[in-house]
Amino acid sequence: MIETENTENSAQETTQRKIKAIRYNTDKYWNCYAIADAETGEILDDAQGYGYKTAQNAYRCWYYKHRDKSKDKEKRKKEYKIKDWLKIHRKDIEQDLQDTQWYYIKDGIGEINTEVMKNILKEHNLVLPETFTAFDLLKYCKKQNLWL
């Protein structure tokens, strides 16, 4: 048995429909949230009957499930291009990045930023392709735990 009650969260419009997080009770759990259609009240997502602990988590899950997946493809393409570029140029910049990171940690400066990455690339006369930037390269290296 599901009892629904409106929360103070206003309805938010997605590309397909207006949604809102509602509070409801299940047989197992109390004070759960689900995503419902703002106009009809139909429950669209309730975490397989378990509900979400907070309205924010319900919205977060809904938007993740209904995100624009074409952006994910673009992101993967960019990562593949960075990976290919690193296969060729990794040896050129690896030691400088490791040394710089060592001094930054030792002196308590923090992390390597985009400007440092640009300077290291400039020292080695390396030019990045137009498909990604020094920021993208640095972000990829941090994500993959390469030197940083």
Image (tube, rainbow, N blue to C red):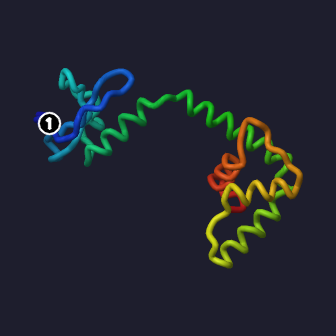
Rendered view: 113 above or below 49:
below
Q: Report the side of 53 relative to 94 (left or right).
A: left
x then y, percent, for residue 148: 68, 62
Q: Residues within 10 Å of mark 1 (few under 14, many from 20)?
A: few
At x 85% / y 50%, what residue is drawn? 89
Rendered view: 97 above or below 37:
below
Q: Quadrant of the N terminus?
A: top left
Which one is in front, 11 or 115?
115
Q: Report the side of 27 relative to 87 (left or right).
A: left
The quarter of the displayed image where residue 6 is located: top left
Rendered view: 132 above or below 41:
below
What element does badge 1 sit on?
strand
Q: Which residue is mark 1?
A: 6
Judged from this view, the residue extending furthest toward the right is 125
x then y, percent, for residue 63: 39, 35
x then y, percent, for residue 66: 42, 29
At x 62% / y 36%, what residue is drawn? 75
Which one is in front, 51 or 110?
110
x then y, percent, for residue 93: 82, 57
At x 68% / y 55%, what residue is drawn? 114
Total number of numbered labels? 1
Judged from this view, the residue extending furthest toward the bottom is 107
The quarter of the displayed image where residue 64 is located: top left
At x 66% / y 59%, what residue is drawn? 113
Q: Report the side of 55 relative to 76 (left or right).
A: left
Q: Report the side of 58 relative to 91 (left or right).
A: left
Q: Amino acid at mark 1?
A: Asn
